[in-house]
Image (cartoon, rainbow, N blue to C red):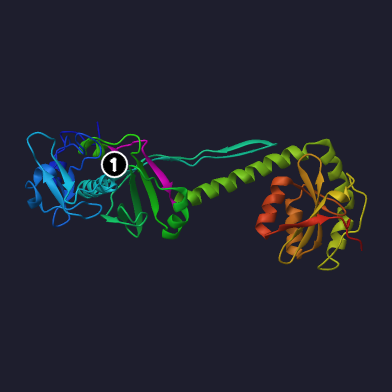
Amino acid sequence: MNPVSSADDWMREALALSPSTALHVAGQATLTFALDAVGVLRHVDAVPNGKTCGCVCPACKEPVIARQGAVRAHSFAHDSGAECRWAQEAVLHHLARQLIAARGSFLLPGADLSVQKVGTAGLIHEPCKLEPQTIHPTEAKLDTLLFVQRPDVILTLGARQLIVAIALTHKVALAKQPRLRELGHAVIQVDLTRQRPATVGALAALLFGDDPRKTWVYNPKHEALRAELTQRSETRYQVLAQGQLEARPETQAALSASRESQGEHSMSRHRTRNTRFARAASATPINEAQGLRYKGRSAALVTYPAPYEAIRVVVLDGPMSMRRELERESIALLADSYLIAKPAWYSFTRRHGLRLDVPWDGGLPQL
């Protein structure tokens, strides 16, 4: 069953409009709706003819004339003869507000928040699809939060607000994203730049039904959920990468060497807070010319490339808590460094605010 049909009488009762009422006649630029003296959107056939209609343009608020002649299709015209580029969008926003307020509901579009992590270890997919959902706002009003020239529909749901922006010519651009985050409101865009509804009933069907022209522009809850999915996919990828790395013969050799030196390494690590590891034989020789230095607020580390998507990390300076975390993240504890998978290392640098300093050519630290 269609969300809105000719059998629905709520539109006629609340707005005195028929679903078949045309939004524009003779051309999409014609104005068939205007605001009366009390701010209610009125159809051209529902007001007196000429200047006595007492209506204004819903966008620029200039007085309009109701043209109800016998030859041309009925429409409004600006009293000055000027054209208003925002009039049609303003009409749709006013009409959408009145429809939502009269119906007492609005259908949110669905969203695909699925996340993928692709790397040399393989593909991780975190699926997440949200179905369309009907909401019942307590208030529907108009406000110029995004565009000064035109008002958008603002729906109130408890302490939260939802912006419904209807675009005929001007979409909500990416440049508006900082403004959206500042407002903290979720935003839905109804894109009518290519296909606009011809009747009031068609607009109502779009608002209260599932339509691909309705999409999310910004939703703080979606952002938080997507961040959680991204972190989950990153964790799964690290597990996958480390599992593959641990299965390689070269890593098994490094693990064997680690077990032999782990006792001595553990004792020397607790002698002082800023313990530095002496150069010792390890499974894979280090190319010191390829070292990269990372610095944080209270830490300095040098990394060296290792085979099979791994990194060897040497701590020059840093708190014991950081060393213990590196030990937990490592796939092997060598006598002079930690062997860690690349994804785990990148997450480690983000958590500790480490930044690449300069290429390191000083070799390994000496006791």
- Depth order, front residue of 267/361: 361
Q: Is residue 355 magenta?
A: no
How many numbered circles are shown? 1
Q: Quadrant of the C terminus?
A: bottom right
Quarter of the figure with the N terminus: top left
Which quadrant of the structure image shows residue 133?
Answer: top left
For this orientation, the residue located farthest to the top is 1
> Residue 38: image x %, image y %?
14, 57
As drawn, the residue found furthest toward the bottom would be: 272
Q: Which residue is mark 1?
A: 207
Q: Looking at the image, which is closer to me, 292 or 74?
A: 74
Secondary structure, mark 1, is: helix
Label 1 CA crowd tier, 10 Å (few <14, some 14–19, many 20+): many
For the point 20% across and 43% down, which residue is it? 31
The answer to which image quadrant residue 54 occupies is: bottom left
Residue range (magenta) = 206-219
Task: Indicate the position of residue 222 as horizontal and vertical percent values.
Answer: 46, 48
* Image vertical order of residue 294 relative to residue 195, above or below: below
User: Would residue 305 be found to the left or right of residue 83 on screen?
Assistant: right
- In the displayed structure image, the side of residue 278 where residue 25 appears, left or right: left
Q: Residue at x 81, y 68 (%)?
A: 273
Is residue 214 inside the magenta stretch? yes
Residue at far front of view: 81
Q: Report the front residue among 141 and 259.
A: 141
The amino acid type, in three-letter code, at marker 1 is: Leu
Q: Looking at the image, can residue 13 be seen? A: no
